[in-house]
Image: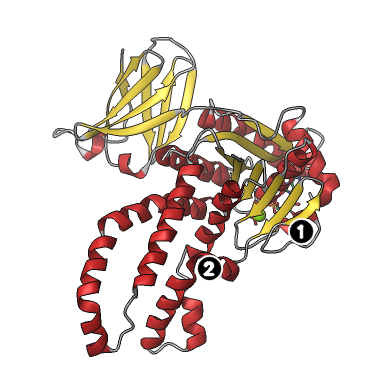
Amino acid sequence: MARIIVYTGKGGVGKTSVAAATGLLAAERGYRTIVLSTDAAHSLADSFDRPLGPEPTLIAPNLWGQESEVFHNIEKYWGTIQSYVSSVLQWRGLDAVMAEEMSVLPGMDELASLLWIAEHHDRGRYDVIVVDAAPTGETLRLLSLPEAGKWWLEKIYPIQRRIAQLTSPLIGRVTGMPMPSESIYTAGEQLFARLEHMHELLSDPELTSIRVVLNLEKMVIKEAQRSFTYFHLYGYPADLIICNRVLPPDAGAYFGAWREAQQRYWPMVEEAFAPVPVRTAPFFDEEVLGERMLRQLGAVIFGEDDPAAFFYRGRPYTVHRADGGYLLDLELPFTSRSEVELSRFGDELVIQVGSWRRNLILPRVLLDVPTASAAFHDHTLRIEFRATAEASPASRGGPRHGRD
Ligand SMILES: Nc1ncnc2c1ncn2[C@@H]1O[C@H](COP(=O)(O)OP(=O)(O)OP(=O)(O)O)[C@@H](O)[C@H]1O
Ligand SMILES: [Mg+2]
């Protein structure tokens, strides 16, 4: 059993720095720790200021670093399938080198790097696996792939396989197209089994935490909110938000407007992610490079706390289908029964109960469905989304009220 901590967030917010700082602190607290970069554009080696390779490299006592490498991973996990895809592309007239290059399907490279997480977990060499993942959108899509892959495997694959077994010698003879052999199907099945295993690990709240790194900028916060929503949807446990590069009060006149904007955005962050806690790190007066700065960053984020702790358990809200509509259940930190006010602006839902406010980005499935009611059930606020016959497009997005 290893603790798995995945850092994600928009490009440039400080994921690599925070992941490296977490890893260093965990190692210094006595955990055998690996920091694994699964982002194809690695910068972990720069962050630690030392070379790293596609296999784990010892950086400091208890601390290993790894920058997984596309072709190394593909060879390791995808070899058989990839050579088949490559042979089909060559048959289609593609030059051999080009075919090799093209046979790395989109997403395959990062998925293959994520498979390292499962491998490290299963081998049991590390107590803590810290992952410096690709920027938000990409990781999300990939994280959801194991589910899609499973579906593909269960629904289509067996049928395809049967058809292919019946027809492939014929098609092969007539067209000359390379036909998948038994070993390619076996490799595919093994791969999907691994992806499924990885999905189980990443969605296990006893093992994994997804942590979102952000800066106090509007677009960054929005994107972080969107990924936060999708984590809930896919059941990936989020336990911490790291708000990085917060300007200190003595930032100076030049940064005055920036600091003012950051202060304006701060309440948005609290509203968007609570009850998941938010920790902050200041904008340091130098780059975060090397152990000295990483240690400082780790210290401001975690203080005396264990960086591998679970900072939040549970799911602040869930969405499920019910009788042709959808229910969004939201955990409430209080028992007040005051009036609920809902307002919708595009993909945002603002929930106001007395002075308490929550700002959620709605998942895509709910975008065109009007809110029908809101009611309290114990500590949960249940919001019903339902397309009604009389719901005109104009009524969508307008404020609606619900009462207990
Ligand atoms: N709190 C901070 N104060 C000052 N500089 C910082 C801070 N955090 C990160 N940096 C610097 O910002 C730059 C980007 O950080 P980092 O590489 O960690 O971001 P990232 O989210 O991993 O980026 P990418 O999306 O490109 O992988 C680096 O030069 C890093 O040293
Ligand atoms: Mg990075």
Q: Nearer the viewer, mark 2 or mark 1?
A: 2
Residue where numbered disc 2 is placed: 74
- Residue at image x 37%, y 13%? 378
| Kind of residue at disc 1 | Asp
Picture quarter with the C terminus: top left
Please state if 106 lies on the left or on the right of 13 as rendered. left
Q: Is residue 137 left or right of residue 267?
A: left
Label of residue 317 in the image:
none
| Quadrant assignment, res 318 | top left
> Which residue is at the front of the view, 80 or 100?
80
Q: What amino acid is found at the position of numbered circle 2 in the picture? A: Ile
Sequence-wise first label, 2 or 1? 1
**Mark 1 Cα shell of 10 Å, populated few (<14), some (14-19), many (≥20):** some
- Categorize mark 2 by other alpha carbons within 10 Å: few (<14), some (14-19), many (20+): many
Residue 46 badge:
1
Ligand 1 within 8 Å of the CB at mark 1: yes
Q: CA distance from mark 2 to mark 1?
A: 24 Å
Decide: is 280 above or below 90.
above
User: Does residue 275 appear in this view?
Assistant: yes
Q: Nearer the viewer, residue 261 or 135?
A: 135
Residue 282 seen in render: no
Q: Residue at x 74, y 61 (%)?
A: 52
Residue at the extreme left: 389
Is 184 situated above or below 257? below
Instruction: Name the secondary structure under disc 2.
Output: helix
- Residue positioned 28% across, 27% down in the render: 384
Q: Nearer the viewer, residue 100 or 8?
A: 100
Image location (x, y in percent) of residue 276: 55, 29
Labels 2 & 1 near each other (Cβ < 8 A): no
